[in-house]
Image: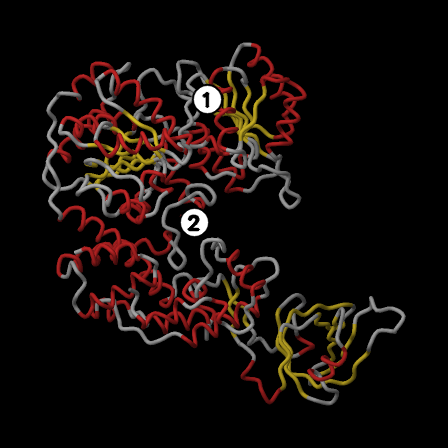
């Protein structure tokens, strides 16, 4: 149970005045919270950080106000001028003056009675807003603030500016955040006193107030003390949660699963290729972990096409030699099916049974799969989130493998672990992750890396081409199709968008289908699962040979004879995403190429990104460059990013704090693993505030 002290933080935003269903939905959109899953709480609102400020202290006098600048002026209202009754399109004007000169306030679609009450003739008022000059005359269209001189304290002098979404004004948002802050209780301190003294950090509550109601523009800066304090809290919560997972996994004695050779030797014998040195090293590290009494918690980081599945398969074979089951959880049905297609026939050759469990298996066939898992008939269980459903009982789950970990949260990891009795855990990712991000997402794990490609893989030639040369590219596509090549054509959007002039998948499909006929296929995320599968099968079997797609093909789709990748609007993609997409070709023995089509003119950062793609195929270097060029918020491409999403911390600016938080979390858990001390109890509150409830459950489990 969450401590009652925190109840105000978790009150719904609809408990705030002026936030009805419509505004509530807009705020959900702004905070990226799915209203079908949950509604935003006060804690979500106060974790929204302003990106800049408006300084309303500038009072140069009307005559000296700079064109286009936000200015505050104390004026006397002279007279109102309503538009003629036969032309309501004209604005309502109010004329006023101060000691230095005259100003006109302009209002469109005005309500005269309201304006007369706000700006009575002959009264002194303070107005603040953007000033514009026409023929030497000063005007202010729709002032941001109108305050009677006697109530000047109501004007915010330094006003934070937040990211906004259509239909939500800064004033509404600011009011809601202000009211939320007024409701918050005083919390005990969870940062170590010595560190607090050395750093000069304010308390959590004071830091929030200083950022949302700044007294100086510097308060909002990303390297201000209030912001650093909140960044540290966010890092500490994350590192503590990861540390508790590690602590729980490591402290419970694992079961030793030494290599016995029964299946591992057979598997090496039936593999249709030779292992790389990197694969051999990773297999040895994992084998050693499995053989020890301590539970394994390892991250297998491999570049695109470096052969992680085989490394995982060897671990599964070692578990089977000791009578245990292994479950491999993938983020999509496409990827789960692919793992099944790779592993199942080889498993059969060495005498072991594999099953596939996704949301698609129904009725009798599902019942049979679940019965085989429960009885231990099957050694390898491959699937999606379906693997952690309540209806799935394992006979003896000894190894939990999670593929593309950045698509899953810590709680899904814990749910899979809970299906066995202290199972070992292997996490795999094909997205090379910079060192700082490894710390944030996998700070609790040992790391193995696969850097080399399996033998026989040729490097992919990468070319950059402006959109104006599309006709030339189409001629080359025509030649390649006549030669029998298979081609991916990637577009960034499913439907045409008016706001972004990007070629949609459907429009591009129609265009290419008209030119090349039925050998053109289409696949995107909005299609039904069966349609997607059919489209991929047709491409794999060669019924279609030019596949127009969204980034749905980014992870794990394996068509070894596809040799050309065309990415339209490449300047819009993140580096890691471009690298993932390029990794879909060059998987067979054919010389492959990747064409990055861009729409001119492009910015310096976009140009730098495309050049990095041309220069290197090293995913780890690409990941570091991506972090440098774009910042961690979007380092794994848009939205599917899935690494911890930071609200208050900025990895580039605050990475030194991450290292301190990691160290601090380890020391805390060594001294007080159950968080029972006075500081430990305060840290429990911190875990709740940053939504790390899964870690609290671990504490309760003992």
Q: Is residue 89 above or below residue 576?
A: below
Tell which of 550 and 463 is nearer to you.
550
The spot of residue 465 in percent (x, y) is 57, 28
Which residue of the protein is positioned furthest toward the right in this rendering? 86
Residue, x 63% and y 25% (percent of image)? Answer: 470
Q: At numbered mark 1, what does the secondary structure look like: helix, strand or loop? A: strand
Q: Is residue 491 above or below residue 11?
A: above
The spot of residue 403 in percent (x, y) is 33, 35
Residue, x 12% and y 21% (percent of image)? Answer: 261
Q: How is the image coloured?
A: secondary structure
Give the quarter of the figure containing the N terminus: bottom left
Tell which of 549 and 471 is nearer to you.
549
* 341 lies left or right of 351: right
Q: At numbered mark 2, what does the secondary structure look like: helix, strand or loop? A: helix
Which residue of the protein is positioned furthest toward the front in this rendering? 364
Tell which of 545 and 533 is nearer to you.
533
Give the quarter of the figure containing the C terminus: bottom left
Task: Identify residue for label 1.
Answer: 461
Tell which of 432 and 481 is nearer to you.
481
Residue, x 40% and y 48% (percent of image)? Answer: 632
Residue 633, which numbered label?
2
Q: Quadrant location of residue 580?
A: top left
* 90 lies left or right of 373: right
The spot of residue 4 in percent (x, y) is 32, 71
* 148 lies left or right of 459: right
Q: Earlier in the sequence, mark 2 or mark 1?
A: 1
Residue, x 42% and y 41% (percent of image)? Answer: 636
Mark nearer the viewer, 2 or 1: 2
């Amino acid at each position: 149970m969450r401590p009652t002290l925190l109840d105000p933080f978790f009150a719904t935003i609809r408990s705030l005045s002026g936030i009805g269903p419509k505004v509530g939905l807009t705020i959900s959109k702004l905070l990226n919270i799915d209203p079908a899953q949950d509604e935003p709480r006060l804690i979500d609102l106060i974790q929204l950080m302003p990106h800049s400020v408006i300084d309303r202290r500038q009072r140069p006098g009307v005559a000296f106000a700079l064109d286009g600048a936000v200015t505050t002026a104390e004026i006397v209202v002279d007279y109102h001028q309503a538009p003629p009754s036969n032309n309501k399109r004209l604005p309502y004007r109010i004329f006023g003056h101060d000691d230095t000169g005259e100003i006109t306030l302009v209002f469109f679609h005005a309500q005269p009675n309201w304006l007369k009450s706000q700006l009575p003739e002959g009264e002194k008022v303070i107005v603040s807003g953007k000033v514009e000059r026409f023929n030497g005359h000063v005007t202010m269209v729709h002032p941001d603030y109108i305050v009677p001189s006697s109530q000047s304290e109501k004007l915010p002098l330094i006003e934070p500016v937040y990211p906004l979404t259509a239909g939500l004004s800064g004033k509404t948002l600011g009011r809601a955040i202000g009211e939320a802050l007024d409701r918050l209780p005083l919390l005990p301190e969870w940062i170590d006193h010595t560190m607090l003294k050395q750093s000069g950090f304010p308390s959590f509550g004071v830091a929030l107030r200083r950022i949302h109601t700044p007294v100086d523009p510097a308060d909002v800066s990303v390297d201000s003390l209030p912001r650093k304090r909140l960044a540290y809290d966010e890092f500490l919560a994350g590192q503590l949660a990861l540390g508790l997972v590690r602590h729980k996994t490591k402290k419970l004695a694992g079961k030793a699963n030494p290599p016995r050779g029964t299946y591992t030797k057979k598997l090496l014998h039936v593999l249709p290729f030779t292992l790389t040195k990197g694969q051999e090293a990773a297999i040895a590290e994992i084998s050693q972990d499995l053989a020890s009494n301590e539970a394994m918690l390892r991250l297998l980081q491999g570049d695109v096409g470096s052969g992680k599945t085989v490394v995982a398969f060897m671990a599964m074979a070692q578990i089977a030699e000791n009578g245990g089951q292994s479950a491999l959880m993938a983020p999509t049905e496409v990827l789960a099916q692919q793992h099944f297609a790779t592993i199942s026939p080889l498993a059969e050759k060495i005498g072991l049974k594999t099953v596939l469990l996704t949301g698609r298996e129904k009725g009798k066939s599902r019942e049979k799969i679940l019965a085989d898992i429960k009885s231990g008939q099957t050694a390898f269980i491959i699937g999606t989130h379906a693997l952690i459903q309540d209806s799935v009982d394992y006979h003896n789950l000894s190894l939990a493998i999670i593929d593309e970990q950045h698509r899953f949260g810590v709680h899904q990891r814990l749910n899979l672990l809970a299906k066995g009795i202290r199972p070992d855990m292997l996490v795999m990712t094909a997205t090379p992750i910079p060192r700082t991000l490894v710390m944030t997402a996998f700070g609790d794990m040992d790391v193995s890396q696969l850097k080399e490609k399996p033998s026989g893989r040729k490097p992919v030639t990468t070319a950059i081409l402006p959109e104006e040369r599309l006709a030339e590219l189409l001629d080359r596509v025509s030649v390649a199709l006549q030669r029998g090549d298979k081609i991916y054509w990637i577009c960034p959007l499913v439907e045409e968008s008016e706001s972004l002039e990007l070629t949609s998948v459907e429009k591009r499909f129609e265009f290419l289908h008209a030119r090349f006929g039925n050998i053109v296929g289409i696949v995107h995320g909005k299609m039904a699962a069966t349609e997607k599968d059919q489209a991929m099968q047709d491409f794999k079997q060669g019924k279609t040979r030019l596949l127009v797609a969204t980034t749905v093909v980014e992870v794990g789709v394996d068509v070894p004879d596809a040799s050309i990748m065309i990415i339209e609007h490449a300047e819009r993609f993140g580096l890691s995403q471009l690298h993932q997409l390029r990794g879909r070709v060059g998987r067979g023995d054919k010389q492959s190429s990747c064409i990055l089509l861009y729409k001119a003119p492009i910015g310096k950062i976009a140009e730098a990104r495309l050049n990095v793609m041309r220069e290197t195929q090293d995913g780890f270097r690409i990941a570091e460059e991506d972090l440098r060029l774009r910042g961690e918020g979007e380092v794994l491409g848009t939205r599917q990013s899935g690494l911890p999403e930071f609200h208050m911390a900025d990895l580039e600016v605050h990475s030194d704090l991450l290292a301190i938080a990691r160290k601090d979390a380890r020391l805390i858990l060594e001294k007080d693993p159950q968080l029972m001390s006075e500081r430990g109890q305060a840290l429990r509150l911190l875990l709740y505030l940053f939504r790390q409830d899964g870690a609290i459950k671990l504490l309760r489990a003992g």
